[in-house]
Each structure stands twice: as structure tokens, then as C-alpha cells.
Image: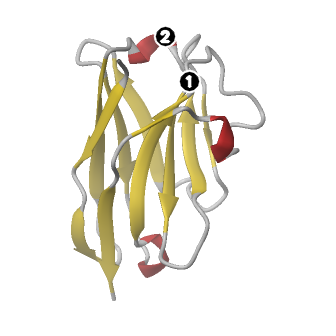
Amino acid sequence: QVQLMESGGGSVQAGGSLGLSCKASGVTSSRYCMVWFRQAPGREREGVAAVDGVDGYTTYAGFAKGRFGISKDNTKNTLYLQMDSLKTEDSAIYYCATDLSFRCGDHWFVRERYLYWGQGTQVTVSS
């Protein structure tokens, strides 16, 4: 049974940093495409970043490039998202997910493809 559990959310002022974690169980996360999504109130869930299972290739949404970093620790079966230079518009619930594919591909941001989701962790950025 695949389970994903996020942690590390919280409140921070604009310009600050936060690091999120996603602990996987029932699956070897290093083998598969793992992604971060986020959802702000009244908005659709959107892709933030993805990392391939095959070669660790990473890809980011435009708003995340240069500010966020996605990574895995295969020894801990954990996915991370380091977020720097946070803005108020980054406030959202952040989710990790996987569809157990080896590569994320060009359509990594399509939320409907992901079968397994964590419960989410709240990130609040204040001005």
C-alpha cells in the first residue's frame, strides 16, 4: 500500500525559506516519478516540480524556477522541496504525489495522472 506523508509546512515571512518533506512508504520512491503540487484557496491544484525515477532529472513550473529545489534522499525514501525567496502568492497547501511511472515526462503537471497523494502541508507566507 503506497502512502505519502508531507511535513515541514508552516508560516514564514516573504523572502524567507521553508523546506518540505514527503516520506514514502509501500513504494521505493527513488524508482519513480515524484512530484510536488500546490493548491491555494479558490484555485486549481497546480504542479510545482517533478523529479524522474530513472535518472533524477528535475523540472519546474515557471514560478518555481530559480527559487525552489526538488530532491530525493533514496536512503530515507523521502522527497524534498526546498523553497527560497518565498512570496505571498506561494501560500497554499503543498502535496506530493506519484503515479509509479519511471519518468515524469513533458506532462508531469497533469494532476489527473497521479494515483497517490499525500494529505498535504500548509505553507503560509506573510508580507
Q: Report the Cα–Cα distance between label 2 and label 1.
A: 7 Å
Residue that badge 1 annotates: 33
Q: Please state the horizontal and vertical placement of residue 34, each as a whole percent of the image.
A: 50, 29
Picture residue at 43% right of the left edge, 14% below the top: 30
Element type where label 2 sits in the image? helix
Quadrant position of the C terminus in the picture: bottom left
* Dot 2 and dot 1 residues touching (CB under 8 Å): no
Quadrant position of the N terminus in the picture: top left
The disc labelled 2 sits on which kind of residue? Arg
Picture residue at 55% right of the left edge, 32% below the top: 115
Q: Residues within 10 Å of mark 2 (few under 14, many from 20)?
A: some
Picture residue at 43% right of the left edge, 41% below the top: 96
Q: Quadrant of residue 109?
A: top right
Q: Where 11 falls versus 36 (above or below)?
A: below
Q: Where 43 falls versus 113 (above or below)?
A: below
- For residue 101, side relative to residue 77 (left or right): right
> Which of these two is toward me, 16 or 22?
22
